[in-house]
Amino acid sequence: MTIMPYNSFDDYPMSWRPKLDRSERALYLTLARTLEDDIASGALKPGTRLPPQRELADFLDVNVSTVAKAFKLCELKGLLSATVGSGTFVAYSALTDKRFLERAEGTHVIDMGSVQPEDSANAALLDMARSLFRSDEAAALFSFHAQGEDEWQKDAAVTFMRLCGHEAHREQILFANGAQNAISAVFASLFRRGEKIAVDDHTYPGVKSAAAMFGVKLVPVRSGEQGMEPADLERLCRSEKIHGVYLISACHNPTTATLPEDRRREIAAVLRAYGALLIEDGTNQLMQRGVPSVSSFAPERSIYIATMSKVIAPGLRAACAAVPDACKEAVAGALYSLNVGVVPMMAELAARVIASGQFERIVAAHRRHTGERSRLVRAFLPDEICRGGDADIFRWLTLPERFTSVQFEQAALARGVRVAAAERFAVGKTLPARAVRVAFCTPPRDQLEKGLSVLAELIAD
């Protein structure tokens, strides 16, 4: 085969013309690094279709395998999205990397970007922590605790999950240091590099980080106002080998969608039909009472994760997972590799919060305070552009056509308010929604009013 000479590309249209440093032996690593640098610098914009691999190989005078390996490496990092028949694109989600977005340096920023519950529970938690440290068992909190050592904590976890709408058994329970930790353990233990997990087309950024870390490929499923669409999930399962499905069943992060029961049943039916494993994130389910988990309809194919950081207090890094027998040993091994063990103080405090009955009172107070703040949000941002219910601790704000979500995030930050652009949540080559996530439980009330006023002015200007 004759390699085309370099100068034959002088007048040839190409979306990317990298300069390759040939001093390194592993040229694919150099090419991958160049691609990452060009995305970071803005030379390659999100959504850009890269040249076909053979065309780029001819341009660089390298083997096609060199380009293929470089693209695969960047795809596993979440920088590229490749679809058979469509080509390879710079992922919109590349903008979720903190390096790619400007910060408001030297100014006080009202944080409406990070999702946390309001802080009414902190005083009660402090009282319980003081009581815990005065107890006879306090010294044991500084010892090593193996999984399964405290069976009564598993009973507390079963109670917690029941309140979230999921029926679990003590033998299924594993503990983790937060939901992100549990998700990472599941990805590390149950999926091989390159295997595909279906997710909502906009999803929780922590899942994208875990997927990039363990080389799992996320595939977007169309989602509407009621969440993931079962018909599109089935279409995807028919056309591709989908090994797992990750979803947030209530107050989806970032869109606030809550799956109705009929849709939950339909998704479970698709899982059973195609043999995919469900990872259900029940982080916000507790605030949405009365609906059974998706996992309830396919328990043999489901891992249900519940955590306290979004419904009690962000510093209470305690999560539990209900894992089917076929997966339990592998997930337990991954949790041990990641953590050795859960933090005993967190596990004990979380279990006591549930067993003492304080838990219900704390959640009721959160609902009351969240409802009050929801009414304040509604006074500045009308429901027709600001999606979310009174029990949700953030909103999905639709923007005027003159803004992209990144432009709005930057404009708000320049005025001292941090929100989260849709690009941070978009999966693969999904076109980001013209929207931002607005979290409203973190700032004090006076700052919240000021922040909401800034957002309303930006939309109206």
Image (spheres, rainbow, N blue to C red):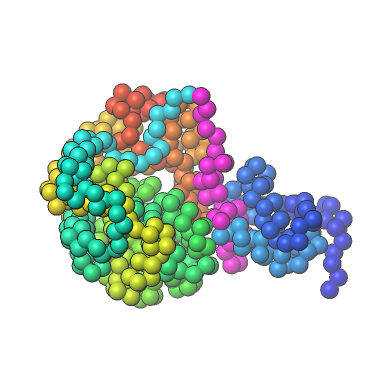
Which residue is rendered at x = 39% and y = 57% of the image?
339
Residue at image point 40% right, 29% down? 110
Q: In the rendered picture of this protein, how many numbered marks are placed on residues?
A: 0
The answer to whether residue 332 is visible is yes
Which residue is nearer to you in this view: 315 or 103? Answer: 315
Q: Is residue 432 above or below residue 73?
A: above
**Residue plotted at (65% across, 42% down):** 41
Closer to the camera, 19 or 232?
19
Report the magenta residues as a range: 77-106
Q: Is residue 116 above or below residue 86?
A: above
Q: Is residue 240 above or below residue 25?
A: below
The percent coordinates of residue 255 (x first, y second) are 37, 47
In the image, 119: left or right of 453? left
Q: Quadrant of residue 267?
A: bottom left
Q: Position of residue 215 (x, y in %)?
A: 52, 62
Q: Is residue 100 left or right of residue 281?
A: right
Identified at 46% across, 56% down, the residue is 210
Percent position of residue 394, x then y: 33, 41
Q: Nearer the viewer, residue 41 or 126?
A: 126
Q: Quadrant of the N terminus?
A: bottom right
Residue at the extreme left: 357
When the figure is inspected, residue 459 is found, relative to residue 308, above or below; the finding is above
Report x, y in % for residue 351: 20, 52
Q: Is residue 242 magenta?
A: no
Q: Answer with the quarter of the image where residue 198 lies.
A: bottom left
Asked if the stretch drawn in magenta spans residue 86, the answer is yes
Can I make out residue 264 in this image?
A: no
